[in-house]
Image (cartoon, rainbow, N blue to C red):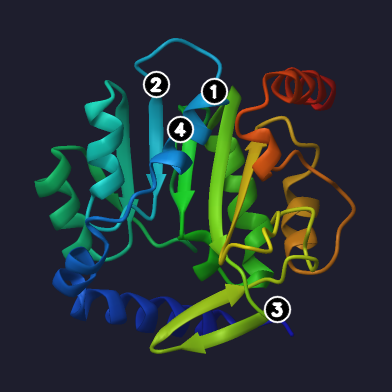
């Protein structure tokens, strides 16, 4: 069902209100989370020499911004919650843009990589193709998008004051590679994927594309990495 613009405005406002009211609590609850393997997965698939320009999409209080900066890269954060954005600047020393996920204003072709760790699931399904297209446009020609999202029972709606979309391991498999033993699904997509619109629809139960995605066997598999490179070249 297509949502009215007013509905989308409410979704954004209430979700951000949830984070605004719990910014300090959110920081304390996530500051020690180890997402090093996610950061390494993104960096490993980016072509080009460091320092790399990274957009941390939904950077929260800045934990991963600080990690990218400590590795010698040039990260910029994007966060919708003003309190979280302020914390991110303080904790990382990085530039942070305050933007609504549903009203992005991104420079074209600027970033080597986009790190969307536990953030894109807040985008309503009907808006996902457009948001993915905007993220794609912000990547350099060889840029890479990393995204990690919660797995569940193919549900979309409100959960404890936040709006979110949770996809099963099979539904939307073209976008989210479900790991049966994990509660999170991770995907790595090159800017050359054929259709960001189809990619977004695939995530919501439609579309036809089958972009490259991560899986446990790929993490330390050099031959498969070469096959991935060949596939990416073929789809650019």
For the question of whether residue 214 can be seen, the reply is no
Whichever of labels 4 and 1 marks the residue nearer the N terminus, that label is: 4
Q: Is residue 75 above or below residue 61?
A: above
- Characterize the local packing of mark 4: few (<14), some (14-19) or many (20 or more) Cα atoms within 10 angstroms: few
Q: Is residue 45 left or right of residue 19?
A: right
> Which residue occupies the foreground of this view, 74 or 170?
170
Residue linked to disc 1:
46
| Left or right relative to 180: residue 172 | right
Measuring from the top left, give residue 115's x and y in whole percent.
Answer: 46, 43
Residue 82, given in percent of the width and then of the height, sits at 21, 64
* Distance in Å between CA atoms under marks 4 and 2: 13 Å
Disc 3 marks which residue?
A: 154
Q: Which residue is drawn at 68% across and 34% down?
A: 218
Secondary structure under the numbered disc 3 in the rendered image: loop
Q: Distance between the residues labelled 3 and 2?
A: 35 Å
Q: What element carries label 2?
A: loop
In this view, which residue lies farthest toward the top? Answer: 49
Q: Name the residue under label 2.
A: 52
Q: Earlier in the sequence, mark 3 or mark 2?
A: 2
Q: Quote the CA–CA distance across marks 3 and 1.
A: 31 Å
Among the two numbered marks 4 and 2 on one chain, the one whose residue lies closer to the N terminus: 4
Q: Which residue is drawn at 31% across and 23% down?
A: 73
- Marks 1/2 in contact by CB < 8 Å: the verdict is yes
Please name which of the two marks, 3 or 2, marks the residue nearer to the observer.
3
Nearer mark to the viewer, of 4 and 2? 4
Q: Which residue is drawn at 74% across and 17% down?
A: 226
Q: Distance between the residues labelled 1 and 2?
A: 9 Å
Tag of residue 40: 4
Q: Distance between the residues labelled 4 and 1?
A: 10 Å
- Residue at 61 percent of width and 39 percent of height: 136
What count of labels does the image hold? 4
């Amino acid at each position: 069902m297509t949502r009215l613009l007013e509905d989308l405005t409410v979704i954004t406002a209430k979700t951000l209100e949830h984070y605004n009211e719990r910014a300090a609590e959110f920081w304390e609850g996530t500051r020690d989370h180890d997402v090093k393997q996610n950061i390494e997965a993104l960096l490993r698939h980016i072509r080009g020499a460091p320092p790399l320009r990274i957009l941390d999409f939904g950077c929260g209080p800045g934990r991963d911004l600080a990690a990218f900066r400590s590795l010698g890269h040039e990260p910029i954060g994007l966060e919708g919650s003003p309190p979280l954005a302020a914390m991110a600047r303080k904790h990382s020393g990085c530039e942070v843009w305050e933007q609504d996920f549903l009203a992005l204003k991104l420079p074209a072709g600027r970033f080597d990589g986009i790190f969307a760790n536990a953030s894109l699931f807040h985008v309503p399904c009907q808006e996902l193709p457009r948001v993915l297209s905007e993220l794609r446009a912000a990547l350099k020609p060889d840029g890479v998008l990393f995204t990690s999202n919660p797995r569940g029972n193919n549900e979309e709606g409100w959960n404890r004051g936040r709006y979110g979309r949770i996809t099963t391991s099979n539904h939307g498999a073209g976008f989210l590679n479900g790991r049966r033993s994990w509660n999170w699904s991770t995907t790595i997509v090159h800017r050359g994927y054929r259709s960001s619109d189809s990619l977004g629809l695939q995530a919501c139960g439609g579309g036809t594309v089958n972009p490259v995605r991560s899986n446990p066997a790929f993490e330390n598999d050099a031959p498969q990495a070469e096959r991935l490179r060949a596939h990416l070249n073929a789809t650019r």
